[in-house]
Amino acid sequence: MSDTRGAVLDYLAALNDGDADAVAARVTEDFVNEHTSARGRSLTGRAAYRERLPGFLGTFADLRYEVEELLVDGDRAALAYRMTARMQRDGAPEVPVDVRGVFRFRVRDGLVAARADYWDGEVVAAQIEAADAAAR
């Protein structure tokens, strides 16, 4: 398994395990986490990412990223995924979330140095709206 492929799959496995420390241990100190969706929030640095992980992991119970396709070219990778979870929202009923997206990765020294996440926030918003409507 290439170093890049292994780093990406190890990172995804840590996310699927819901282990914030393990996820943070798989990124570089200067990690860049870019979200292209208006509903996402980008950040830079392992410490900032580690600080945000518990909130993210706590919001998405049973988080699961399923690999649809993984393309690797040197220190770069593109991973098409399907993310499923049960979204927990401040006292509101859980919402099942099912969204497809693509990660672009850059790997350095066996760790993820950059991740750009492309997903459609409107798909998630529509799922939340449908769940809320059903609960009313």
Image (spheres, rainbow, N blue to C red):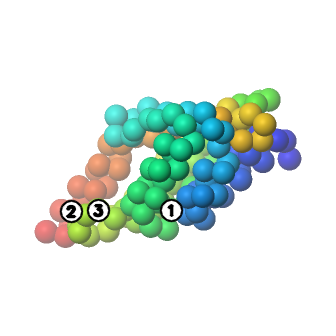
Residue 115 seen in the current view: no
Please name the residue that numbered disc 3 is placed on.
89
In this rendering, position of residue 86 left or right of residue 48: left
Going from the N terminus, do you reach mark 1 or mark 2 first? 1
Please name the residue that numbered disc 1 is placed on.
63
Q: Nearer the viewer, residue 132 or 11?
A: 11
Q: CA distance from mark 1 to mark 3?
A: 15 Å
Tag 3's secondary structure? strand
Tag 2's secondary structure? helix
Residue appearing at x 21%, y 62% in the figure: 132
In this rendering, position of residue 115 left or right of residue 85: right
Q: Position of residue 66 (x, y in %)?
A: 60, 56
- Labelled pair 1, 3 in contact (Cβ < 8 Å): no
The 10 Å Cα crowd at callout 1, few under 14, some 14 to 19, many 20 or more, is many
Going from the N terminus, do you reach mark 3 or mark 2 first? 3
Residue appearing at x 53%, y 44% in the figure: 47
Tag 1's secondary structure? strand
